[in-house]
């Protein structure tokens, strides 16, 4: 029996997987920006190393975030009728593409692994995440994606 | 603000992705005034890793006309460097680097890739003695001379004191002419900068002509300070060590990875071959050989080939860059010179006398392999005089696989040129053809 609101397909006991995973890459990418800034100010390599690890971890976890999100988007056609969903998807495609380039920039050695390109890319990624994250919230809190109760999820 | 940043990012990225320089002719970078292109930084540095396949079916390296080559001995465990004792016995140092740490995700990937460019044989971390008393190229004696060493590389004998430069210390052993094995415990003369990172781990060693001082090459702990400037304490230097006390001072600094320390026989000047920095392009930065001047600074990490700034190093040190010494002779980029010997023998044809042979371990940081050969640099009046010539080649197959890689060089008692091949695990001997 269909729920009143768009439902999440990738879920565990009624809990959608996508919102469970998505904080990890967000924190990693925000953390990358923070440690990039600290490196740019201090030129102390440990901060650039933190950036490289967080950026890598963020990208790896993003693979699973994207898979869960795609399953949701394709699992209930009502989701892609939402304008917020398209902003969320397209924005994050751009953000992840920039993060991949940023990962390569961060494989350089010493200062130019961060300044200037790495720092700019880290900033752009976080800026896009602010927009796409907002629209993710729009989908859940305004349109009720994944929060609706349907019969089979009822305990 | 974001639009400006975006434009900046787009501009810099398009710069990084497009217009990457193609590898140029390495000959333009051989000699005292190498061609120096603009710096290029990459998203993925251009690389070609030569997989080690080993020598099979009687295959040997190729030598220049008038020469012949044969294997003096095979089946070593990482034959890295060579030393000929006064009685003609040949020491073969079997060694490899300590395990490379993973401090960044990049190093995890690099360590995996580099595995195939090194011999699969686990290094002996010992010294093997060969004796070929009659000089026929077939050793009569082969013994384990010194065992259980700590990533050894350099050896120097002064009187009856035999010094071995491990990666973390110089140790002295008693030696008498004719010894084929040393069992006496060594006495440490001095510590050297070793772990925990130990990026450039080979410690080249030589003694001053009067025997009072030792000189040890101590390479940098990184490509270009990516492990922090603190990791470079006392590194990228040639140490001068007092043989009596073990006290040391920096004899010359700013040498990223100095090896092949040797005194030029006519001027008694110290010379070295130096591995320069990577990931600035296929033709940057040229490796070089140079006379090493007391107190001189050669640029690393702040600048290369004199005053050419490296943008990857912060904070900058304009005071040091201003006094950076220009090296004597470029060998072209990424050839990885690790062996240097002045030829004072009488076996090889006259055109190989008085100059220097250089063992080039070979490149990874360019799409066309460079190095993987032994070249001869003619000298006149104690200075390089003319173009380097290929003497021993054929270490690489036409499809880019490596049969072997030349490292340390020495001249044996009969005037043969010896080449340690740490990938093929052979010691090669080059002599005059028909001789």
Image (cartoon, rainbow, N blue to C red):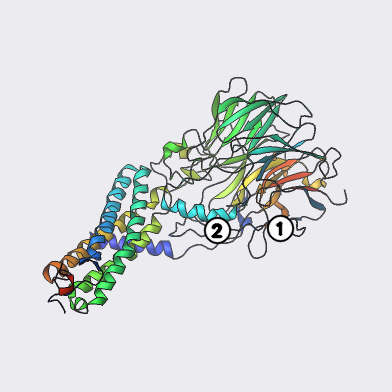
Q: Where residue A85 sits in the image (x, y, percent)? A: 21, 72
Q: Residues within 10 Å of mark 2 (few under 14, many from 20)?
A: many
Q: Quadrant of the N terminus of chain B?
A: bottom left
Q: Chain of mark 2?
A: B
Residue at position x 58%, y 56% in the image: B116
Q: Where residue B402 sits in the image (x, y, percent)? A: 65, 58
Looking at the image, residue B74 lies above or below residue B86: below
Does B52 sit left or right of B175 as displayed?
left
Q: Quadrant of residue A70?
A: bottom left
Does B18 sit left or right of B188 as displayed?
left
Considering the numbered disc 2 on the image, is that residue within a helix, a strand or a loop? loop
> Residue at label 1?
B394
Mark linked to residue A73 = none
> Residue at label 2?
B366
User: Label 2 to label 1, Cα distance in Å?
Assistant: 19 Å
* Both labels 2 and 1 in a single chain: yes
Q: Quadrant of residue B218?
A: top right
């Amino acid at each position: 029996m269909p729920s009143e609101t768009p439902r999440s397909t990738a879920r565990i006991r009624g809990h959608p997987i996508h919102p469970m995973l998505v904080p990890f890459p967000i924190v990693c990418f925000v953390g990358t920006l923070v440690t990039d800034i600290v490196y740019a100010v201090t030129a102390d390599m440990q901060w650039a190393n933190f950036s490289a690890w967080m950026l890598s971890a963020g990208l790896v976890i993003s693979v699973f975030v994207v898979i869960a999100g795609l399953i949701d988007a394709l699992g209930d056609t009502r989701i892609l009728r939402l304008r917020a969903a398209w902003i969320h998807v397209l924005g994050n495609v751009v953000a992840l593409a920039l993060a991949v380039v940023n990962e390569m920039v961060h494989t350089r050695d010493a200062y130019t692994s961060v300044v200037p390109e790495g720092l700019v890319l880290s900033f752009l990624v976080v800026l896009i995440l602010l927009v796409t994250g907002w629209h993710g919230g729009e989908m859940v809190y305004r349109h009720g994606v994944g929060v609706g109760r349907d019969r089979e999820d009822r305990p | 603000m974001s639009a400006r940043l975006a434009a900046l990012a787009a501009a810099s990225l398009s710069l990084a992705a497009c217009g990457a320089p193609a590898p140029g002719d390495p000959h333009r970078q051989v000699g005292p005034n190498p061609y120096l292109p603009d710096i290029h930084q990459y998203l993925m540095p251009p690389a070609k890793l030569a997989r080690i396949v080993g020598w099979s079916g009687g295959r040997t390296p190729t030598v220049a006309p008038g020469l012949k080559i044969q294997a003096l001995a095979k089946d070593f465990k990482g034959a890295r460097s060579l030393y000929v004792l006064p009685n003609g016995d040949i020491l073969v140092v079997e060694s490899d680097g300590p395990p490379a740490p993973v401090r960044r995700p990049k190093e995890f990937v690099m360590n995996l890739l580099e595995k195939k460019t090194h011999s699969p044989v686990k290094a002996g971390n010992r010294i093997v003695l060969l004796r070929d008393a009659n000089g026929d190229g077939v050793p009569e004696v082969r013994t384990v001379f010194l065992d259980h060493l700590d990533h050894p590389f350099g050896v120097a004998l002064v009187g009856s004191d035999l010094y071995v430069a491990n990666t973390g210390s110089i140790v002295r052993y008693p030696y008498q002419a004719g010894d084929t094995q040393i069992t006496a415990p060594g006495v440490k003369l001095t510590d050297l900068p070793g772990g925990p990172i130990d990026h450039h781990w080979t410690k080249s060693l030589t003694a001053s002509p009067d025997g009072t001082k030792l000189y040890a090459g101590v390479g940098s702990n990184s490509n270009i300070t990516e492990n922090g400037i603190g990791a470079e304490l006392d590194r990228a230097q040639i140490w001068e060590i007092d043989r009596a006390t073990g006290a040391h001072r920096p004899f010359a600094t700013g040498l990223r990875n100095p090896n092949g320390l040797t005194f030029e026989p006519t001027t008694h000047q110290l010379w070295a071959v130096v591995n320069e920095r990577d990931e600035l392009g296929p033709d940057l930065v040229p490796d070089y050989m140079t006379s090493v001047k007391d107190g001189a600074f050669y640029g690393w990490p702040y600048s290369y080939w004199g005053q050419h700034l490296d943008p990857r190093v912060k904070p900058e040190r304009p005071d040091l860059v201003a006094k950076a010494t220009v090296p004597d002779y470029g060998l072209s980029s990424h050839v990885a010179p690790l062996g240097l010997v002045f030829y004072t023998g009488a076996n090889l044809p006259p055109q190989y006398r008085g100059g220097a042979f250089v063992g080039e371990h070979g490149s990874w940081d360019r799409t066309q392999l460079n190095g993987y050969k032994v070249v001869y640099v003619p000298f006149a009046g104690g200075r390089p005089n003319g173009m380097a010539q290929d003497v021993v080649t054929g270490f690489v197959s036409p499809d880019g696989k490596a049969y072997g890689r030349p490292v340390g060089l020495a001249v044996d008692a009969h005037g043969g040129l010896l080449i340690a091949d740490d990938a093929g695990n052979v010691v090669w001997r080059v002599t005059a053809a028909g001789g």
